[in-house]
Image: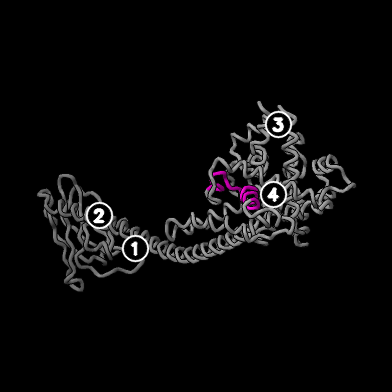
Amino acid sequence: MDVQRYISSGIIESYVVGLVSEREAREVENAIAEFPEIRAAVEACRQDMELYVELSAVKPPKAIRTRILDAIENETQPEGEQLLPEELRRPDAAGEEEEKVFKMPALNINAAQTWLYVAIGALLLLLVSVICNFYYAGQYKTYLQKSTELLASEETLTQQTKVYQARQQALEKELSLLKDPALKWTRLSGSGKHTGQLAAIAWNTQSKEVYLLALSLPEPAADQQYQLWAVVNGKPVDAGVFEMGQQQHALQKMKEISAAQVFIITLEKKGGNTSPALDQVFLAGKANS
Amino acid sequence: MSDLRPSLTYTEAELVQGLKARDEKVFSYVYDHYSPALYGVALKVVNDENTAVDVLQEIFLKIWRGIERYDVDKGRLFTWMLNIARNTAIDTLRSRAHKLGQKMQEIGNGHQQQEQLIVQQSVDHLGLSKVLDQLNKEQRTIIDLAYYRGCTQEEIAKLLDMPLGTVKTRMRNAIIQLRNILKQV
């Protein structure tokens, strides 16, 4: 290599002012390492450039000195770190040819503004969220109440349904009883002061079952009940007490009776008696058999 | 000018050692002695005081953070710091010109090139030293475009309307002329 020619080619000056490409810069650096004359020429040129640069030296504003020294002092803290450009971790000389995008310190103001906007945005979202919370909490209460009401009414309906089912079953049973040809009907009517009072007895002479329908009887006192008797050869046999009130219009199953010539109904003490109070006979009827 | 160099208080090796040891006293010494030169570079490149101040801060943070990467074999400390200053300032200018260019492009294509020319031409309005009046306009411009603007050979050839092959020799001539002038100082 012709060192002198290389030196006078202008490549060294171009290298020092940063005019050469990356490839050329590597060439020059190799030449510097190889030839002391070239190294000396580069160094001389650098000193010229540095003198030239120093001609434009300007004392920076005093305030910046404090700012920079503060940044250095706080560099371990996040604020100090924030002041640093991201690519600081790269060797500066190596990055000479690379396209770098710097985060300028001035951008910190923008960053603060950005954070302010973010904060305002977050607050607005929070406010909206709170309002929504109140609104939906109110709606929730309303729906909860409605739901409770619906559950209660459903419960009522279920119970009513059960009542109706029971009633329907009873009615079906009555209907089937009424249609049973084995049943013998006896009409019991009152006389004297009991005129107009009525009851009906349905007696299945095969199964011995006895049903009573209290058609028209006065409501007894709370401690009293009507009692049915089957009279066989003048001897009364207890056929059980029966209810009045709601049960008055329903068929009530009585005790089984195997034989009867006459049915009588007497008013007895609650729970019934072993023998009828014959002065309290309300109704009587000759049994059909 | 000589007061901008490290004084007798510290040798360059001591400065490097002090910076590597995170010695804040050494750092403030370095700041006091080198900041005018580095600020001058920043100011010449970005041509705006507010931006130059920000650039200067970035330069010194890079020096403080990057001292471990300083290689004594590659050059003197001052050379290393000037490179940081120059690169930082030029990158700032480029990102600014780039942003400006993007804005221009939004308005209408073709403005970016024009914008770049405006930035580059403003070199003529930078402060001039009496001494440098002895450099002819082309010589001063070719040095400044390369050093302070980071222009490529092609850009300089185009801007100064000279053949691409002569840019390097013209640059050499300009620096030789500069050397002769500086010898008189």
Residue A214 lies in the magenta stretch = no
Q: Chain of mark 3?
A: A
The residue labelled by disc 4 is: B85
Instruction: Evaluate whether label 3 is on the same chain as label 2.
Output: yes
Task: State the residue in front, A134 or B185.
Answer: B185
Task: State the residue in front, B77 or A191.
Answer: B77
* Residue A161: image location, x then y, percent: 27, 57
- Residue name at image x 20 percent, y 52 percent: A210
Q: Chain of mark 4?
A: B
Q: Which residues are magenta?
A: B139-157
Look at the image and tell me whether residue A230 can be seen.
no
- Residue name at image x 66 percent, y 44 percent: B173
Q: Using a 10 Å C-alpha cutoff, classify the residue at mark 2 as few (fewer than 14 neighbours), some (14 to 19) or many (20 or more).
A: few
Looking at the magenta stretch, what is its main secondary structure? Answer: helix
Disc 4 marks a residue whose amino acid type is Ala
C-alpha distance separating marks 4 and 1: 122 Å
C-alpha distance separating marks 4 and 2: 99 Å
Question: Which is closer to the viewer, label 4 or label 2?
Answer: 4
Whichever of callouts 3 and 2 sits on the residue coming sooner in the sequence is 3
C-alpha distance separating marks 1 and 3: 136 Å
Disc 3 marks a residue whose amino acid type is Ile
Image quadrant of residue A28? top right
Instruction: Evaluate whether label 1 is on the same chain as label 3.
Output: yes
Q: Using a 10 Å C-alpha cutoff, classify the residue at mark 4 as few (fewer than 14 neighbours), some (14 to 19) or many (20 or more).
A: many
Question: Which is closer to the viewer, label 4 or label 3?
Answer: 3
The residue labelled by disc 3 is: A32
- Residue A165's disc is 2
- Residue A269's disc is 1
Q: Secondary structure at mark 1?
A: strand
